[in-house]
Amino acid sequence: MRLSARSSEKAAEYNRYIRSKWIALMVLALVLFAVCVLAVSVGSSGLSLWEIVKALFGQGTVKSRTIIWNLRMPRVAAGIGVGIALAMTGCVMQNVLRNPLASASTLGVTQGASFGAAFAIVQLGAGVQIGNAGAAAAIAVTNPYMVTVCAFLGGIATTAVVLGLSRIGNVTPYTMILAGVALSSLFTGATTLIQYFADDVLISTVVYWTFGSLGRAGWREIALIFLFSGLAFLYFIFNRWNYNAMESGTPTAKSLGVPVDSLILISMVVCSLISAVSVAFVGCINFIGLIAPHIVRRFVGSDYRFLLPCSALMGAVIMIAADIVSRMLVAPTVLPIGALTSFLGAPLFLYMIIKKGNIT
């Protein structure tokens, strides 16, 4: 009887644990819905709430429908897709590399992908500038597949170096961050050299592209971001138990039958791919992959059944919120969203380094 009562108590405790995680997931989904509604509502056009509602259902004036479906909704959709991709990347990288500071931006993957995309735009003619240089310019990616492939190759080159370092026994997780800084500097320098030998139009195109903007992705690019992010999410969630085992360390995971080597390799390649797709279409957006998983861990812990989807939702929330701020802070000028996410992420990055002590 005592054993049965104890089992019932354990079962009830587990049910409460699962319930709390589902509640956190639903709350994040509601928060994402709220910030998306706010993002669609705010702007300098002066549309009323009723005009916005009518435009969403294909009614109202041509002007209101154009503003909602050609300007605001693509920004929101791009923010959701890119936020999900970058947050999942950071969440998985932190697990397989056993490094709480790992993300696409801190390990140089974003910078490598940026170099690949810049190479495609300048040397291979995959992008052009429309309009004047500066804030009023627009970037048209004439060959998004070429940009994506080149960005992926740049990101995967960085990933190969990171994976190589992770196999060296005397390299600590925090030393890998220093390697990421070195790789970031290397690819930034290479991107600068590409700009140096380009003409003025292409220079301004690459510079403006590196600022990061959700406004330059059209529905075709957004569809590609969601396609790759969705496939990546399916792979990650399929391996959720393997990631949970990895939380206990590589030896423990191997003893439980987890194919550690192949899991690390495939996970990092998938992370590089979705990071490259995001960078190719919206430019450099840093620290989302670092911020989102650490915020979510405080509420749902390290159970990857819930950490992965919650991190994805949190990444989307942060992206949409940052985009709202970028449009409202000095309206009607739209600030580069990459700068705002860096302002958010850099203090957290420094805090984590101080908290962990000597990173070597």
Image (spheres, grey):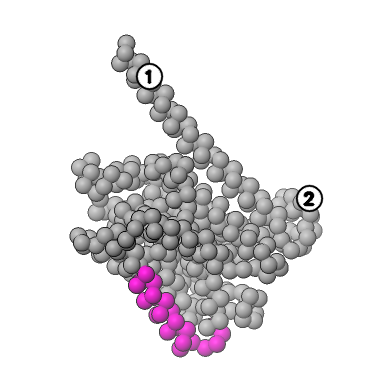
Front-most of residues 28 and 153: 28
Image quadrant where one finds the C terminus? bottom left
Circle 1 residue: 8
Circle 2 residue: 50
Instruction: Report the residue at 32% width, 61% height from top.
Output: 359
Q: Is 303 situated left or right of 20 in this image?
A: left
The stretch of residues the image draws in magenta is 181-202
**Which SS type dominates the magenta stretch?**
helix
For numbered disc 1, what is the local secondary structure?
A: helix
Image quadrant where one finds the N terminus? top left
Name the amino acid, label 1: Ser
Asked whether residue 187 is drawn in magenta, I would say: yes
Q: Of label 2 and label 1, which has the lower sequence position? A: 1
Q: Is label 2 or label 1 in front? A: 1
| Quarter of the image where one finds residue 101 | bottom left
Q: Is 347 situated left or right of 327 in this image?
A: left
Kindly tell me whether residue 86 is visible in this rendering.
no
